[in-house]
Amino acid sequence: MRARYSAYVAGETDFLFRSWHPRTRPDQVRGDASIRWTGLRVLRAEDDVVEFIASFETDHGPGQMHEVSTFAERGGRWVYVEARAD
């Protein structure tokens, strides 16, 4: 999760694409230059689930994204599967 957050901060869309499960990833992963990520707080990490709050700023002001994400291990690496409703 931290590596994916860092990739969003740095605009490393290739890493984001590779670290997304092939079953759920979009055809292209694009960054959004209007968002400046300002912090990550991991609330819990259990088995294949990570709950986090990512803070950001835009021209419209600050905001937060709260998500519970599911990951899967593939080929010895953890990949993002999807956000789930909790």
Image (cartoon, helix red, strand yellow):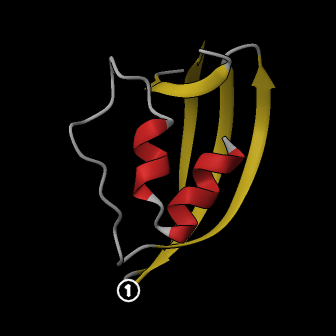
Q: Position of residue 22 (x, y in %)?
A: 35, 22
33 or 76, which lies in front? 76
**Left or right for 58, reference 48:** left
59 or 3, which lies in front? 3
**Left or right for 59, reference 15:** left
Q: Position of residue 86 (x, y in %)?
A: 54, 20
Q: Position of residue 11 (x, y in %)?
A: 46, 67
Q: Residue at x 77, y 38 (%)?
A: 43
Q: Position of residue 23 (x, y in %)?
A: 33, 17
Three-letter amino acid code at disc 1? Answer: Asp
Residue 73 vs 63, above or below: the answer is: above
Residue 9 vs 57, above or below: the answer is: above
| Residue at the disc numbered 1 | 59
**Left or right for 51, reference 58:** right
Quadrant in the picture for the N terminus? top right
Q: Residue at x 24, y 46 (%)?
A: 28
Residue 27 vs 74, above or below: the answer is: below
**Is label 1 in a helix, a strand or a loop?**
loop
Q: Residue furthest front?
A: 75
Q: Few, some or many C-alpha atoms within 10 Å of disc 1 (few <14, some 14-19, many ≥20)? A: few
